[in-house]
Amino acid sequence: MAAATRWSAAEQSNISQVSLTIGSVLPVSVPKEFVGLSYESAQLANPEFFSVKNKELVRLFRELAPNGNLRLGGGSSEYTTYSDEAVAGPMPFEVFGPDTSKTAKKGTVTSALALKNLRGFLDAVNWSCLYGLNLGQGTAEAAAHETAAVQRILGPRLLAFQIGNEPDSFRNRFRAASYGPADFIAEWERFHSAIVKVTPQARFAGPDISNKLPYLTAFAEIAPKYPDVVLLTSHYYAMGPASSPEATLDNLLSPYPKLTTLKRRDLHVIAEAQATAHLPYRMSEGNSCWDGGKAGVSDTFASALWCADYMLQCAARGWAGVNLHGGGNGYYTPIAGAPSTGFIRRPEYFGIKFAQRFVGTTVLGVTLTGASPLVDAFAFESSRGRELVLINKTSQDLACELGDGIAGSLVLTLTAPAIDAKEGVRLAAEHGGFDRVIKAQAYSASVFRLRKQ
């Protein structure tokens, strides 16, 4: 039997006491391509970016996940065009960035060369691709031409096409104020018909909406008519825009205002859409707050804890995956930088890598008693055995008593010098003894190996 954990009186005064029980195995497993990143389509205007020549970026993708999904889309996809020919003249930029369609609205051309380089990149990192098409300002004929090239060049690396980015935001931008779900579905079906005439083997995902759930419901209702629709998608930003005074570090750590209380219905609508369409669901774009993130919030260790927690919440719901949006030097991008200056891992990168540990596992039920709303627990079963995750987003250390004759041993921690630290994030293996009472330090994510006493 493991020895009882002992802390000094001073330590005990700053330790929150909780208890936990592990439930039964749930009918949920985490898919191998659960981890994903999302980049703007305009990034392909630089054909050297997603290329095997960009060796440092290849290394960072490989290090993040041995299998994953790269989604290309975003606001710039509604301004990007395709050309079979290489674009003459200098590239419009070395590295693009998040949400820059607000300032760069032309000159972003995807060429066949960019697609060939992208295929080499995807082969090198062993990731698939979710590819966005221009619905906002494009034509069905242009989409069909581009789709044929993408299908031919990306081949088995192509997961699916998405027709349009955030069509629920087209009103008063690309469409009339009266534009609604029925109008989108009519356009989607017209584009789909044109595409499959040229590329009958194409597969599709959607509706890739921002937040207006009637579009998701409408898409789910027509999806059974189309066997080539393989995935439901939409976006999620925890806060935002970045200019909002409510986009704060404390609110990022709070218990997901969009996933609880008034927004709890969102989860029900997603689940209902899955049941209607008989399809898996993927969060295809999202992050801490939109407009590229907020300095002092999106680029701090808080974003890593938020990211790890959010991704495991999604995994526990049985979602197909999560694509965190980024690129360039946006504050929320997991990987920042450019080929000429070098790349850096932002704190969120380590939160994603923490969640990657549980790809391929089966989810277990967990009941946490007496904990702050800022503490979350998850449990998983795999060839490593049973593992427990405690994510402690409070300023107090946490002592957790394991029930049912179970003991735990610390095997991995995600920590940093401070919750607002931009550097010094540490994802490290640990080697502790088994104990009936386990400890998770303040502002940390911890993994414990479990065994019966």
Image (cartoon, rainbow, N blue to C red):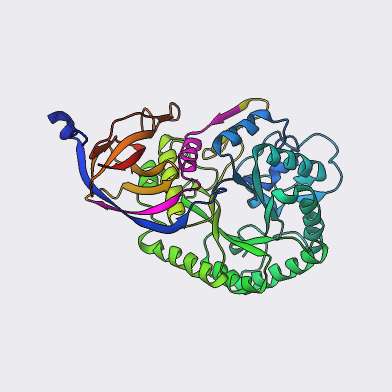
Q: Where's residue 373, x and y in %?
A: 29, 50
| Region in magenta | 343-369
Of residue 407 and residue 13, the one placed in the foreground of this image is 407
Tell me which residue sits at (51%, 36%) in the image. 349
Question: Is 349 inside the magenta-drawn segment?
Answer: yes
Does the image show residue 15?
A: yes
Residue sitting farthest toward the left: 9
Residue at x 37% of width, y 43% of height: 387
Front-lying residue, 7 or 290: 7
Q: Is residue 273 magenta?
A: no
Q: Position of residue 207 (x, y in %)?
A: 61, 63
Does residue 263 lie above or below 1 as drawn?
below
The spot of residue 221 in percent (x, y) is 58, 74
Residue 180 visible in image: no
Residue 186 relative to residue 20: left or right: right
Frontmost residue, 140 versus 243:
140
